[in-house]
Image: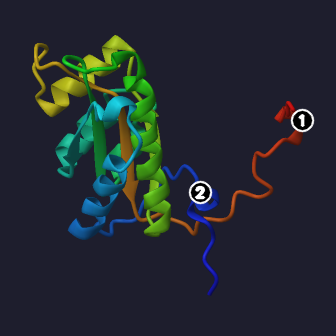
Amino acid sequence: METQDPVFARTSVRAYTDEAVTEEQVEQLLRAAMAAPSAMNQEPWEFWVVEGKVQLEALASASPYAKPCAHAALAIVPCLKTEGLPCPDMAEQDMGAAIENILVEAAELGLGAVWQGIYPMEERVHATAQVLGIPDDAGLAPFAIVAVGHPAKPISPTGPGRFDPARVHRIG
């Protein structure tokens, strides 16, 4: 069977089976996240892996868009370091790259995942930090929640994609 390029196979998956995600798969997702480019190699991230049903349900309540967590095998919560970064203005871009790597690697592993934004909405950041047990003075801010699991239904290709040549401009 021919495999599809994981960048184009990636889609937001919000419904999951009860099948567990293996420890090897979790490690591969985290390795992919930490392989992301980072301004001045500042790596402004730390990652929480949430697997307990009670904690996943609490995460699902931390944001109006985090409901998929309640039925996911796990959630990865990338947290942004807010202190001591050599290039803090680029940290949000670094975090986005790390999260996208998780999503693409999930597709490569045959898993489903969905990115749920948290940062910079203070009430969502605070609610998520409470679930994780991160104190206010820790110098960390939950940046997103990525629900991960085995898709409840087969993932179909996303169709023609989003490529729009009208949005491409060439110079020279």
In the image: residue 123, left or right of residue 116: left
Q: Compared with residue 16, is residue 127 higher up or lower down, i.e. above or below?
A: above
Q: Position of residue 110 (x, y in %)?
A: 47, 69
Please report whichever mark, 2 or 1, sits nearer to the chain's N-terminal start: 2
In the image: residue 98, left or right of residue 167: left
Front residue of 83/151: it is: 83
Residue at disc 2, secondary structure:
helix
Q: Position of residue 149 (x, y in %)?
A: 38, 59
**Marks 2 and 1, Cα distance to the nearest angstrom?**
21 Å
How packed is label 1: few (under 14 Cα within 10 Å), some, or many (20 or more)?
Answer: few
- In the rendered image, which quarter contains the N terminus? bottom right
- In the rendered image, which quarter contains the C terminus? top right
Residue at disc 1, secondary structure:
helix
Residue type at tag 2: Val
Q: Are marks 2 and 1 in contact (CB under 8 Å)?
A: no
Q: Compared with residue 128, is residue 55 higher up or lower down, i.e. above or below?
A: below
Q: Position of residue 28 (x, y in %)?
A: 31, 62
Front residue of 158/42: it is: 42
Provide the residue designation for mark 2: 7
Q: Residue furthest bottom?
A: 1
Q: Quadrant of residue 40?
A: top left
Provide the residue designation for mark 1: 166
The answer to whether residue 22 is seen in the rendering is no
Front residue of 75/85: it is: 85
Residue type at tag 1: Ala
